[in-house]
Image (spheres, rainbow, N blue to C red):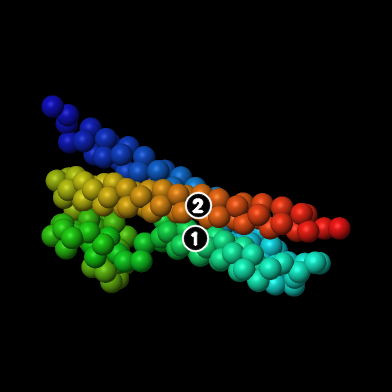
Amino acid sequence: MPQPSEKLALLRWHLDRYDRLRASTASRASVVLSAGAILSAGNAVVLVRLIDGTDPPLDTTVALLFGAGLLTSIGLVVLSLIFATGVLVTPKASRETFTDGHDLPLALTFNPSDTVRELKTYAAFRTAVADQGYAAMLEAAQVELWIGIRQHRLRYVRLRSAARVLRWAAVAFLVSLAGFVITVLSKAP
């Protein structure tokens, strides 16, 4: 059976691990956001070219078809961006996000939201740190690890959604672009 100090060291290792996982997930979300920006630029270029017209002009039906494909791609990029930004910052505090969050004990000094909400002054913080027993530290670390694991999972699910939607946006863009280029080239003199 591990000793209390070993338990705290193991909890610290897990907390550090989940902090790294959350940072990695946020970094991956940044890549999705960057890819979305590049895809948005491509959509804009083709859409402007479509709106400006071609010589000879495209059939209205054909132009609308390509426009619909590009608008689909644009809509999917926006949806991907919404998912990806949900990875970077959660819209609600953890205790509000998770249904059992309000039932969790306070994790003073481990959870910044709990600490700031409960300890309004440095004197209160200093006293809480000095008075916090080993058992309370272990419990606070466990609460923070539980929250960290669940936050990481939630963010990772959003990241996967963002990547999937961005893939479909890229497919819609490529299909529209290929169709547009083939149509324009086939009409060229």
Q: Left or right: 116 with respect to 40?
A: left
Q: Where is mark 1, residue-wise? A: 76
Q: Which mark is first along the chain, 1 or 2?
A: 1
> Which residue is rendered at x = 26% and y = 62% of the image?
97
Q: Considering only vertical position in the picture, is 27 above or below 44?
A: above
> Which residue is rendered at x = 27% and y = 50% of the image?
150
Instruction: Out of 17 and 171, give the one closest to the viewer.
Output: 171
Q: Considering only vertical position in the picture, is 3 above or below 163?
A: above
Residue 103, x across and y down, in percent? 13, 60
Residue type, label 1:
Leu
Q: Residue 33: in sight, yes or no?
A: no
Please state, as top left, top right, bottom left or bottom right, where the C terminus lies in the image.
Answer: bottom right
Q: For the residue labelled by badge 1, is the local secondary structure a helix, a strand or a loop?
A: helix
Instruction: Out of 184 and 15, give the one closest to the viewer.
Output: 184
Q: Where is mark 2, residue-wise? A: 168
Q: Residues within 10 Å of mark 2 (few under 14, many from 20)?
A: some
Callout 2–callout 1 Cβ contact below 8 Å: yes
Please state, as top left, top right, bottom left or bottom right, where the N terminus lies in the image.
Answer: top left
> Which residue is rendered at x = 41% and y = 56% of the image?
87
Determine the residue located farthest toward the top in the rendered image: 1
> Which residue is rendered at x = 49% and y = 60% of the image?
76
Instruction: Out of 32 and 67, give the one closest to the viewer.
Output: 67
Residue type, label 2:
Trp
- Residue 73 lies in quadrant: bottom right
Q: Residue 167: in sight, yes or no?
A: yes
Q: Residues within 10 Å of mark 1 (few under 14, many from 20)?
A: many
Q: Left or right: 175 with respect to 117?
A: right
